[in-house]
Image (spheres, grey):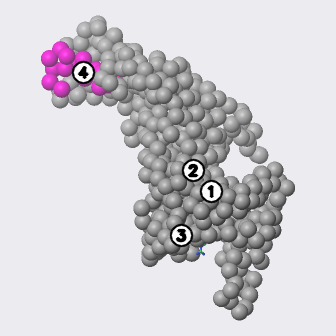
Amino acid sequence: MAQLWGGRFTKETDQVVYEFNASISFDKRLYRQDIEGSMAHVKMLAKQGILTIKESDKILHGLLGILQDVDNGKLEITSEYEDIHSFVEANLIKRIGDTGKKLHTGRSRNDQVALDMRLYIRDELKNTDKLLFELMKVLERIMEENLDTFMPGFTHLQKAQPVTLAHHIGAYFEMFKRDRSRLYDIYRRMNYCPLGAGALAGTTYPLDRKYTAELLGFYGPTLNSMDSVSDRDYIIEYLSALATIMMHMSRFSEEIIIWNSNEYRFVELDDAYSTGSSIMPQKKNPDIAELVRGKTGRVYGDLMGFLTTMKGLPLAYNKDMQEDKEGVFDAIDTVTSCITLFTGMVDTMKFNKDVMETSAKNGFTNATDVADYLVNQGVPFRDAHTISGRLVLKCIDEDKALDDLSLEEFREESDVFQEDIYEAISMKTCVEKRLTLGAPGREAMKEVLKKNKKYLDEDVLF
Ligand code: ARG
């Protein structure tokens, strides 16, 4: 074991304790952020005259060498070090000798790890955003292609009123748009540099915190050193945003699973994105959608776990906070693979447009429009509702659609009905008439698509 402390101790740490305490097995993924943070710190120390230019050059050169060697696999990050910070510092000293021991001047691992995590999460926020953007481009294409693809809209999973596939998919477009803006909000709140907070109370060295913040692309330094080393809000916010993204994908997955069932057959998943059964040859299972739905629980768990870790912690740093890493790393890995696979699955999915349209026709989704027709002829809505309901009942008895009734049959319920009822309750009319902004009617949808296109053209939020 290679440790960063020892002067005060008369005995070696017990091996089991050492292993329990260590974080190298998971914080090794922060090596780039750790080294980049150290390089900025050293440049600032030299600018402030705390290190000589010669010393800083030597350290910078050493750090760069470590970064390159880890990148290209020449230097392996092994468990003989407690954490990634010890690994980098010990290797630096090994490479450049005593000058390496000056790296940690004016710094603590507490502000160091706070910085590493911010740098890491900052990159991941952007990455999640990019993945969502790719998914939204696919949704936009499906919308463009399906302005006239009729399908039933549901409430209580019962056919309600006809909509279009473009409109249905557009609902998810809005959800992912909000998800992206949530990521951006988090970024704007968290993009401040904690370096220089020391262990908790700043340092007596004349550090230039604005300079390090600027070197690392932060808006500026954080304003309270105790908060700087103990704030993990941005991780909780990110976990919450990831959980919400998963919730959205999970709802979509649930619909795809239903749509892919033998009973619905609204969609057909591409062979590359579905799996077979080891025993039942006829099966083509929606495993990807089911896994996305299933893994949502796991990301919720990561959020709940870390919220609970933080809830009783007194200021400032406590070792509990080391638990900030595995959960969020797991959530990031899970969400990254889920969005990527989900995008591929949706992009290659075939829509059975005829089946969707037939389903919309057969579910009395135009019953409201029968009532509206009567209202337009002066019948009070409550009476119109009853008349339409009676016609539906008759159709259920005779196993037919409202459009199949003869004019005589319509007129048995109300003599207000004329030949134009068929036109009034056709699928096309039912959808096209719904022209308020945000409704499925073609013209209304086109306006939304224009806005969506502009949104996608403006591209990157960050
Ligand atoms: N591995 C630690 C963590 O992730 C680094 C900070 C250690 N600081 C300390 N005072 N022990 O939180």
Q: Which stretch is magenta?
A: 364-381
Question: Which label's residue is closer to the chain start, 1 or 3?
Answer: 1
Identify residue type, mark 2: Leu
The quadrant of the rendered image in which ligand 1 is seen is: bottom right
From the image, give the main secondary structure of the stretch colored magenta.
helix
Taking 247 as reference, is 233 above or below it? below
Question: Which label's residue is closer to the chain start, 2 or 4?
Answer: 2
Taking 50 as reference, is 286 above or below it? above
Question: Which label's residue is closer to the chain start, 1 or 4?
Answer: 1
The residue carrying mark 1 is: 43
SS label for mark 1: helix
Q: Does the rendering let one see residue 151?
A: no
Identify residue type, mark 4: Asp
Image quadrant in which the N terminus is located: bottom right
For the residues labelled 1 and 2, the Cα–Cα distance comes to 9 Å
For mark 4, does the 10 Å Cα neighbourhood hold few (<14), some (14 to 19), or many (20 or more) residues? many
Q: Residue at x 28, y 16 (%)?
A: 410
Q: Residue at x 47, y 23 (%)?
A: 453
For the residues labelled 4 and 3, the Cα–Cα distance comes to 77 Å
Give the numbered dot on residue 205.
3
The residue carrying mark 4 is: 372
Identify residue type, mark 3: Tyr
